[in-house]
Amino acid sequence: MNAISTITLPLWTAAEIAKATGGAIIGGPEWSVTGISIDSRTIAKGDLFVAIVGPVMDGHDFTAAARAAGATGCLVARSRLNETQAGPTIAVDDTLVALQDLARAARRRSNASVVAVTGSVGKTGTKEMLSHCLAAQTGAEGRVSSTVGNLNNHWGLPLSLARMPADAAFGVFEVGMNHAGEIEPLSRIAAPDVALITAIEAVHIEFFNSVADIARAKAEIFAGVVDGGAAVLPRDSEHYDLLRDLACDAGIERIVSFGRHRDADMRMLEIDLGDDGSRLSVSVEGTPLSYRVAVPGAHVASNSLGVLAAVNLLGVDVDAAASALDTLQPVAGRGRRLDIAVEGGTALLIDEAYNASPASMRAAMQTAALACPGTDGRRIAVLGDMLELGEVGEAAHEALVDTVADAGFDRVYATGALMASLWRMLPTDIRGAHSLDPEELARIVAGEVRPGDVIMVKGSKGSLVSRVVERLIAGGGL
């Protein structure tokens, strides 16, 4: 929606930060920062360290460590000034509110076209895909600002937006939630030109009465869409009509749908799934387009349509964006593939260990089924609990038994009390091991993998099934 320009500026000067936050500059006004962090362990030289007060730790206790690590200045609460003032400082009433104010200032000063991405599953992968496609636009190299990882909550979204340079061409920001009412304020801060919803599924259902209520919570993203902005919606969702109506109620007139549905504006016509990616033939509002997505999985291919719909709405080159999908790379914890050393050779590790829900678990298993083991190799699943499912937790785990069978897994390893529900239903000949201790399971799996195996690891972050990934990468099987 906006022309790509080229400007080079520091991220923020002290005066700009103070003006945006209503803060007081202490220690001299002539300084600027090149980045922002709320974690003293990941400070880069030139950063502004924002001392957020969290439920477990208080950032004010780490200002000295942040300065020692290279932070140019710190943003702190006035009430903590005496214990934190040891260099350039900006004092505010509330550091989280100040970070939100800085994010709003970043949005106001920017001419970037902004897309906000939400959905029950696929948010981070879609955000990465869209960022990759927009970076392929002429003149946009290095000027796409996006959420790092999945910093998508009440402090993650403001942090991501506050990091957007004034000369950014595009901004792509992920917006998440666990409860109703959390997305709307974040969307109003981001003020997106385009709101993209990937899918509606029974994720965080523990905190909702129905999946329709989850759809309503996701639809809060429409509240911040700018005048003349647009929404991209999943046409195959049974909640599409509800989402469309809520978008209309929010005053959004441009609504574009994607999916296999015959009425989808961005319609999938044909798809050829492979273990190294997918080839698609689609219709872009009536115009044919063929392209390849280098990351395997039907869910990835489907979300690529939503990505191209957003690109089209921004008024930039859809062909260039589609071509860029041929060089897409998966991120850690979300389908990353690694050849790992095992005794006697190598095995393929599919790292899906960042998070899990029933929908994403099924998608990951179906994608793993596309990968062919080597000679004498096996297809192995290592599964951790899917969390925040409430009273349907055990049933949701049990329901995966057919997916395990359809995917053709030769061995299944599991950790967690909930995953025991699935474990009990598996045929005995494919049971590898189950342990409540993910560290113990990691040792077992590492000792039993062999050359040619394909090992898919997936579970909710809190299940700690990622310990298996860490051990396998470290060569724990040798």
Image (cartoon, rainbow, N blue to C red):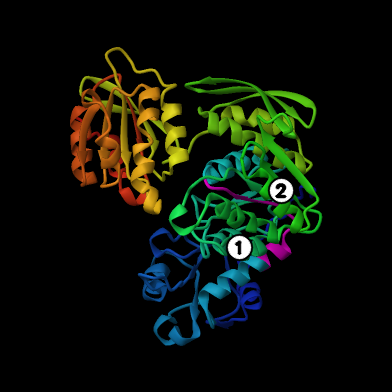
Snapshot quadrant of residue 419:
top left
Which mark, by number, is residue 145?
Answer: none
**Which of the 4 quarters of the picture holds residue 83?**
bottom left
What's the residue type where badge 2 is placed?
Answer: Arg
Q: Kindly report the distance in space between the C-alpha atoms of the residues bearing marks 1 and 2.
A: 20 Å
Residue shown at 72% from the left, 33% from the top: 266
For disc 2, the marked residue is 244
Amino acid tagged 1: Leu
Residue corresponding to mark 1: 186
Asked if 62 appears above or below 199 in the picture, the reply is below
Task: Confirm whether the magenta stretch covers residue 163.
Answer: no
Q: Considering depth in this image, is 417 or 177 the residue closer to the camera?
A: 417
Name the secondary structure under disc 2: helix
- The segment highlighted magenta reads 105-120
Which residue is painted at 46% across and 87% down in the image? 79
Of tags 1 and 2, the one toward the viewer is 2
